[in-house]
Image (tube, rainbow, N blue to C red):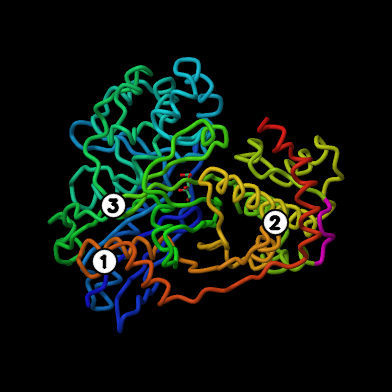
Amino acid sequence: MSSVLAFDFGASSGKAYRGKLLDGRLHIEEVHRFANQPVRVNGHLYWDILQLFQQIKWGLLKTKQEGEYPAAIGIDSWAVDFGLLDETGELLGNPYHYRDRRTDGVMQEVFAQIPRTEIFHRTGIQFLPFNTLYQLYALRKTNPGQLEKATDLLMIPALFRYFLTGEKHNEFSNATTTQFYNPQIGGWDTELLRRLQLPEKLMGPILPPGSRAGVLQQEICRELGVPSIPVIAVAEHDTGSAVAAIPTDQEDFVYLSCGTWSLMGTEQRQALINQQVLAANFTNEGGAGQTFRLLKNIMGLWILQECIRAWETEGSNTSYEQLLDRAAAADAFACFIDPDHPSFLHPEQMPAQIMQYCLETGQQPPANTGATVRCVLESLALKYRYILERTEQLTGKRYNGLHIVGGGIHNKLLCQFTANAIGRPVWAGPVEASAIGNILLQMIALGQIADLASGRNMVKASFPVTVYQPAEQRDWENAYQRFLDITGLLRSEE
Ligand code: LFR
């Protein structure tokens, strides 16, 4: 069978994977890897979009050099970010990165016009300050001229797809994350946009994940010397792709897609939009195979990555492994943070922010790197338990273990802490879930795999899963009660 090529744009790197079916197994192979660093210019944070597009071309060239053109190409990346095109099809400015600070406080301005509850009931999407809705609203204030000139809004993978094929279509999984897709209408909520004086005609048609969405433009075929390869709109939201690759044959399961973000939840046939979901600030993001992910964003390993960045700037060269060793040797349950406290979204100095949080909550701040890492990992694991319990309350189901996928499973300490915190087994793998889900959706579009369920079975049969059994139950139970108390999570629900 012919291979397909998946481009997955993650928080620090982009990767191209070739995927192929051989003897009833899925095989993947990395063909290209490159940095994906946002660029700060004049106080704003942007995608380095053309450089990244160049990397897509190089990825394609590498497959050519290895003598095997892919039968299709698919692209996924994180959600909410977009590019605007003018009427001639030119890109209007560099797309902003969602951690840019221009959306700070914008959500509250929007709520003054349309109540939070109404926005939730129309969209089913959790409130994150960087959702496309608030990014557009911020743009209307800072650069109204750009918005006036725009004729098309394309989410980032759709933008790359447009560069490749010349065709402009958004895709369902990413469309839902904008917070102006209405699952009841099954399309864009133009009324919501109109009431916020935002243009309603930028978005165009929405393709379901796994659609054929054009072929490489002639110009690119000539430049690279490749045939006109089909481009597939996969589940272009990376989390949508990752969840498509959960190695399970069950209908009901909980997952944690663990990378820079931790995305935890379950899969539903329909969006679940009610007061409880709103109160828990869970979301309903569109997925592959006509599903919705009922999930919650948890700040994730970003907190640790930012600590490491700060320590490196101070001159430290301690490796990731050494830091985890120090964390393992540090005192257990010394202090806790709520990883989702808004102050951890983009602080200038993450370790200082953790210290401040501890002081404000009457705790002794961590005294060294090992204690800081331990505090972050234990707090994440305890937050996972909290979100798992909320998920169970919302669905009325009980789950007997947790699937973890994504790069975070390299962090064995976090996997073990998570099993301990939730008191159930953790099944860790595969690491490259987003790329694998991207590959599956391409194979479904090409007719190589029948559907999502067969795809998940294929992943289960093809990639190893590491099992972590819960331990130290009593200590973790006590720690959880203290965590709830310190973070005020239960009080905030009342
Ligand atoms: C994960 C992710 C999350 C989304 C966040 C920002 O990479 O896509 O699902 O909430 O990034 O887009």
Residue 330 magenta-drawn? yes
Q: Which mark is residue 140?
A: none
Q: Is residue 486 left or right of residue 115?
A: right
Q: Quadrant of the N terminus?
A: bottom left
SS category of the residue bearing label 1: helix
Q: Is residue 42 visible?
A: no
Q: Disc 3, disc 1: CB below 8 Å? A: no
How crowded is the residue under tag 3: few (<14 C-alpha within 10 Å), some, or many (20+)? many
Q: Identify residue for label 2.
A: 377
Q: Identify residue for label 1.
A: 443
Q: Is residue 330 left or right of residue 212?
A: right
> Mark 1 or 2 closer to N-term?
2
Q: Is residue 189 visible?
A: yes
> Mark 3 or 1 closer to N-term?
3
Find residue 77 and report its horizontal and vertical position in percent. Answer: 40, 51
Of 180 and 369, which appears nearest the observer?
180
- Residue sitting at 53 percent across and 47 percent down? 396
Find residue 289 and report its horizontal and vertical position in percent. Answer: 31, 54
* Stretch of the chain drawn in magenta: 329-334
Majority SS type along the magenta span: loop
Q: Which mark is residue 209?
A: 3
Q: Could you say which quadrant of the image residue 466 lies in?
A: bottom right
Q: Residue furthest front?
A: 396
How crowded is the residue under tag 2: few (<14 C-alpha within 10 Å), some, or many (20+)? many
Three-letter code for the amino acid on which mark 1 is drawn = Met
